[in-house]
Amino acid sequence: METQIFKPDQIEAAAALLKAGQLVSFPTETVYGLGADATNEAAVKQVYAAKGRPSDNPLIVTVTGQAMVEQYAEPLSAKAQALIDAFWPGSLTLILNLQPGKLSKAVTGGLSTAAFRNPANQTTLALIQAAGVPIVGPSANTSGKPSPTLAQHVYHDLKGKIAGIVDDGPAQVGVESTILDLTADVPTILRPGAVTEEDLEPVIGTVRSTHHKVGKTEVPKAPGMKYKHYAPNAQVYIVDHESDWPAALAWAQAQAYPVGAMALDHVLAANQLPANVEAYTLGPDLASASHRLFAGLRHFDLESPVKGILTQGFADSGLGAAYMNRLNKSAGQVHFQR
Ligand code: TXA
Ligand code: MG
């Protein structure tokens, strides 16, 4: 299969492929998604095959807004309504109870709930509008690899396996949406993202987080969170404190192989880089670091192979909770120890 690249003004052609049961990758403000008509079970099944994704891991349903959610979900609670009003379109995915039989098992993994997302990307909202159906939207990477923040990343992972990619430039946020379970007694963050606990609590009151505590034996409620994720070929080492960088770079220099260093501009500028260390800047701040994390991991996988990647850690709160969640997974919790 030849994978066609579409510009934002060619969404009619991309929508026609979706309507015909084909797979098309779409842009969002978080990461690129892999789209298929959520009402076409055969199309949805192909998503798992293209990504190499375990079939018990349910998919996000990507919608143009509240009206599309109401076709599938039970009547919205006051909290769901308040969250939709405050954060949609945007990087907040809501887990809601479904009307029975409204979405196929291929979408829900057999759960009685589904994850609904309304991305802040005009091209994709127009694409769904043109297709006339919600589209499933897992990240458009090979399962286990870093999520794609550029159309080129999607092309690398899925060329020949999907019909098209709508290229709308870089995804701004860079980490996937916050997933909030509204079917729990207390609304619960299953995956941290750019919409933070601190953003949610003023709107709906107390919110719980499970993502800090997912252990090896526990079965996480977002099934996807149990799989190895975001992993480049090289071992990633988290450098927790800026003051650890001189020791981390001295360790790197003593290795017989090339090492990557991903850190903020001012950290890279403040440290002497050994000859076997290649820098990849995370930009000026936490927002740019979140935007560049997956692209940096892919850079060292594909363009500049290394055996280890030292990567700057941040405090585990606000957007830092999302960044550290992804970084911990890509590192398998390995921290640089001086
Ligand atoms: O930002 C995003 O959310 C991106 C873009 C493309 O929209 N999508 C994304 O999808 O990250 P995916 O499939 O890579 O991650 C969705 C997560 C998985 O961990 C899945 O297990 C969980 O959502 N999930 C889906 N449906 C669920 C449900 N009914 N209950 C609990 N977790 C669910
Ligand atoms: Mg994913």
Image (cartoon, grey):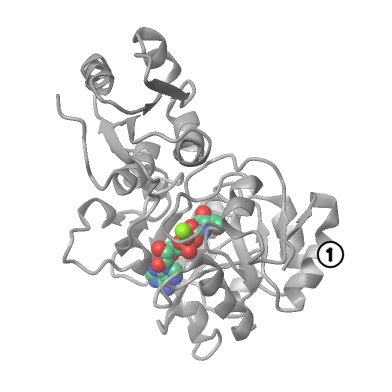
Question: In the picture, which quadrant includes the N terminus?
Answer: bottom right
The residue at 22%/58% (across/down) is: 214
> On the rendered structure, is 212 left or right of 55?
left
Asked if one can make out residue 45 in the rendered structure from this viewpoint, the answer is: yes
Closer to the camera, 194 or 260? 260
Q: Which residue is outermost to the front?
A: 256
Quadrant in the picture for residue 164: bottom right
- Measuring from the top left, give residue 22's x and y in whole percent: 70, 74
Residue 34 vs residue 233: left or right? right
* Residue found at the far bottom of this picture: 101
**Disc 1 target residue:** 13
* Camera-nearest residue between 272 and 86: 272
Above or below 253: residue 111: below
Q: Where is residue 192? Give x, y as percent.
A: 37, 50
The correct choice, above or below, for 317 with respect to 220 in the image is: above
Q: Secondary structure at mark 1?
A: helix
Q: Is residue 30 above or below residue 2?
A: above
Q: Amino acid at mark 1?
A: Ala
Image quadrant in which you'd find residue 180 = bottom left
**Residue 261 at x, y = what percent?**
37, 25
Counting from the top left corner in percent of width and height, residue 225 is at 33, 61
Side of 264 where 210 appears, left or right: left
